[in-house]
Amino acid sequence: MQMATSTRKDMDASLPEIVGHLNLLLGEDLGADEDEDVRELFRKGYRLIDVQNRPTAETPSFGVFIYLRDVADITRRLLWIYTQRHGLGAP
């Protein structure tokens, strides 16, 4: 998604899917007990998916875009860790 070409409707439609992916990865054992970097990603991820921190109808489009970007970034990082810990190829 790009800010200049994405509509608010597109962004709102993407929210449940990307938050769902992050939520699934947060449920995996990725070594957060032993790895401070993973633990920090989990903290950021849980903060982002907290209902109180999600965009609302009153959130400006730019705010929704930034939220989606942040959720996608944490999701991508956790997915990379998941693939490394499970011996899978890079996504």
Image (cartoon, rainbow, N blue to C red):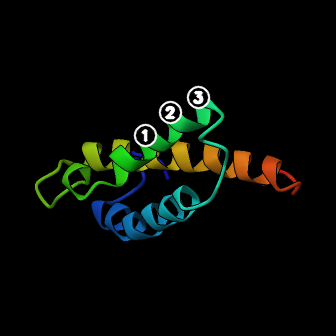
Q: Residue at x 39, y 69 (%)?
A: 16
Q: Which residue is mark 1?
A: 43
Question: In the figure, 5 relative to 17: above or below?
Answer: above
Answer left or right for 41 relative to 60. right
Answer left or right for 39 relative to 54. right
Q: Which residue is mark 3?
A: 36
Task: Specify the amino acid type for callout 1.
Answer: Arg
Distance from disc 1 to disc 3, alpha carbons, whole Å, reads: 10 Å
Distance from disc 3 to disc 2, alpha carbons, whole Å, reads: 6 Å
**Tag 2–tag 1 contact (CB < 8 Å):** yes
Distance from disc 2 to disc 1, alpha carbons, whole Å, reads: 5 Å
Helix, strand or loop at label 3? It is helix
Question: In the figure, 36 relative to 30: above or below?
Answer: above
Q: Which residue is mark 2?
A: 40
The quarter of the rendered structure image containing the C terminus is bottom right
**Tag 3–tag 2 contact (CB < 8 Å):** yes
Q: Residue at x 37, y 71 (%)?
A: 13
Residue 17 lies, in percent from the top left, at: 46, 69
Task: Specify the amino acid type for callout 3.
Answer: Glu
Q: Residue at x 82, y 56 (%)?
A: 86
